[in-house]
Image (cartoon, rainbow, N blue to C red):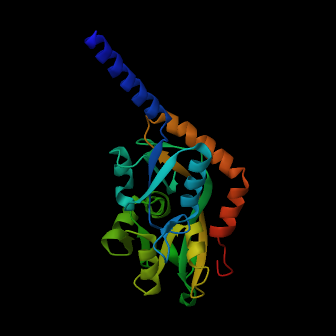
């Protein structure tokens, strides 16, 4: 009888634990680039903010799960996802065939092109930008770098420009823009929305041109996280049709007169 009671008690405890486990709120770790305004960045008070940050927080609230936002260096962010250090990347990541071989993207939530920014007083033209005579700043492991190599200059000329120092690589967008402001580089190529936001209150900088690359941002997840794919796709659809979408646009997306 004692053994029967013991087994019954064990089963009862296991049942309680299983029920508790099923009712627990799901939690996901979200990787971001902390130097990617206006989508994800650290503000003057040290808080993690941005269009994408508030977007995932809204989706989490609507869908009943919790999120932890974790800043990760851009070069390490996909490896971190694959190693299960994070559960998704929600930080202005362009959907590309190369990336899609490793990870699964959500439905697109943002359209963008590549922008070229220079000092206003430089007098530089887009023809000069494409000549290979300028020093161009670009972020490593970005679609801007990929486009310069594959489509704009071609691989052979691109490699020559890298070897000669005509193309300089930076780890973050603010670093490349600081290099431009300090005269270390002549131009920077990056996502047009981020450039527009950055130069809003900097009259010394101007958007020289926008190169139509027809890119789209998506939330990146591991291939086998099927349930999470479905949750995020529904959440994004609801967000884009909600009043919150317009609120976030007004708060973070800026187009200045000097664009």
Image-quadrant location for residue 125: bottom right
Image-quadrant location for residue 32: bottom left
Front residue of this view, candidates 177 and 115: 177
Front residue of this view, candidates 149 and 255: 255
What x and y, as percent, mark residue 41?
A: 49, 68
254 left or right of 189 in image: right
Image-quadrant location for residue 101: top left
* Residue furthest out toward the front: 1
Residue 43 drawn above or below residue 15: below
What x and y, as percent, mark residue 178?
A: 44, 81
Can residue 46 be seen here? The reply is yes
Front residue of this view, candidates 15 and 48: 15
The quarter of the picture where the C terminus appears is bottom right
What x and y, as percent, mark residue 102?
A: 40, 42
Residue 86 drawn above or below residue 51: above
Looking at the image, how many numbered discs can be counted on the residues? 0
- Residue found 43% across the figure and 87% down from its top: 183
* Residue furthest out toward the top: 1
- Residue found 61% across the figure and 79% down from its top: 200
What x and y, as percent, mark residue 139?
A: 42, 67
257 left or right of 142 in image: right
175 left or right of 95 in image: left
The quarter of the picture where the N terminus appears is top left
Residue 53 drawn above or below residue 61: below
187 left or right of 111 in image: left
- Residue found 66% across the figure and 45% down from its top: 237
Can residue 96 be seen here? The reply is no
């Amino acid at each position: 009888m004692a053994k029967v009671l013991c087994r019954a008690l064990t089963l009862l405890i296991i049942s309680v634990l299983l029920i508790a486990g099923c009712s627990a709120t799901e939690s996901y770790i979200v990787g971001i680039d902390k130097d990617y305004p206006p989508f994800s960045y650290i503000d003057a008070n040290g808080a993690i903010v941005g269009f994408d940050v508030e977007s995932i927080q809204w989706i989490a609230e609507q869908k009943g799960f919790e999120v932890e936002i974790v800043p990760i260096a851009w070069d390490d962010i996909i490896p971190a996802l694959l190693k299960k250090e994070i559960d998704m990347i929600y930080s202005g990541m362009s959907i590309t065939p190369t990336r899609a071989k490793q990870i699964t993207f959500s439905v697109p939530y943002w359209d963008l092109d590549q922008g070229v920014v220079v000092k206003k007083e430089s007098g530089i033209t887009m023809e000069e930008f494409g000549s290979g005579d300028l020093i161009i700043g670009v972020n490593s492991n970005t679609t801007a770098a990929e486009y310069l190599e594959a489509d704009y200059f071609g691989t052979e000329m691109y490699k020559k420009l890298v070897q000669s120092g005509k193309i300089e690589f930076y780890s973050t967008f603010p670093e490349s823009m600081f290099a431009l402001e300090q005269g270390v580089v002549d131009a920077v190529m990056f996502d047009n929305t981020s450039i527009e936001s950055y130069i809003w209150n900097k009259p010394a900088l101007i958007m020289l041109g926008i190169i139509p690359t027809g890119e789209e941002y998506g939330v990146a997840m591991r291939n086998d996280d099927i349930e999470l794919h479905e949750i995020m796709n529904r959440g994004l659809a609801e967000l884009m049709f909600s009043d919150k979408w317009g609120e976030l646009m007004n708060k973070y997306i800026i187009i200045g007169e000097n664009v």
